[in-house]
Amino acid sequence: MKFDFFNKAKNNLNAAQLCFDNALYDASANRAYYAAFQAAIAVLLHKGIKRDKIDHKLVQADFSEKLIKRQKIFPNRLKSYLLEMQSVRDQADYKHENVSKQEAFRQIRKAEEMLNLIEQELKK
């Protein structure tokens, strides 16, 4: 199951890049967030941390609190990534102002960093 979520994460990262390459910056930001979110779910499952319901706030809190703060598996800089990325995704999906090219690029870079680090952890 964890690899199902990680595969979804990789697919969403690819979709984010395709959208970016076609100047679809709102869609790119959305897919980049979901790539990071699904990768976080995958590694939480890998570490035996499972909830009955997948909830954005709970996944963000578990990832930050359990895997960064307590277990120190991931660098502290990742602590705010999911929350910040969701904020950009919310702008893309629910606000009048579009996501800029620069912001969409940052979303992809953050997602790539998370997926790379999480993939290393999943291979252990």
Image (cartoon, helix red, strand yellow):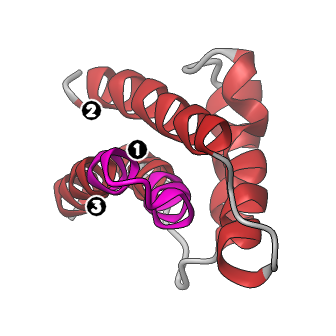
- First in sequence: mark 3 vs mark 2: 3
Give the class, few, some or many, for how many residues have Cα within 10 Å of label 1's Cα (few <14, many ≥20).
many
Task: Check residue 5 in the rendering and tell me which mark sits there, or answer none.
Answer: 3
Task: Check residue 101 in the rendering and tell me which mark sits there, or answer none.
Answer: none
Q: Nearer the viewer, mark 3 or mark 2?
A: 3
Left or right: 116 as drawn, with respect to 24? left
List the residue tagged with mark 1.
43
Task: Provide the secondary structure element on which disc 3 rests.
Answer: helix
Q: Is residue 97 above or below residue 117?
A: below
Q: How many labels, in total?
A: 3
Q: Amino acid at mark 3?
A: Phe
* The one of 31 and 115 positioned closer to us in this rendering: 31
Q: Is residue 21 magenta?
A: yes
Determine the CA span between mark 3 and mark 1.
Answer: 9 Å
Determine the CA span between mark 3 and mark 2.
Answer: 12 Å
List the residue tagged with mark 2.
122
Q: Amino acid at mark 2?
A: Leu
Q: Residue drawn 41% across and 58% down?
A: 38
Q: Residue drawn 40% across and 30% down?
A: 112
Q: Position of residue 36 (x, y in %)?
A: 48, 48
Point out the image quarter for the N terminus: bottom left
Left or right: 84 as drawn, with respect to 23? right
Task: Provide the secondary structure element on which disc 1 rests.
Answer: helix
Q: Are marks 1 and 2 in contact (CB under 8 Å)?
A: yes
Q: Position of residue 102 (x, y in %)?
A: 64, 35
Q: Which residues are the magenta region?
A: 16-34
Determine the CA span between mark 1 and mark 2.
Answer: 7 Å
- First in sequence: mark 1 vs mark 2: 1
Q: Position of residue 90 (x, y in %)?
A: 73, 71
Q: Amino acid at mark 1?
A: Val
Q: Is residue 43 above or below residue 33?
A: above
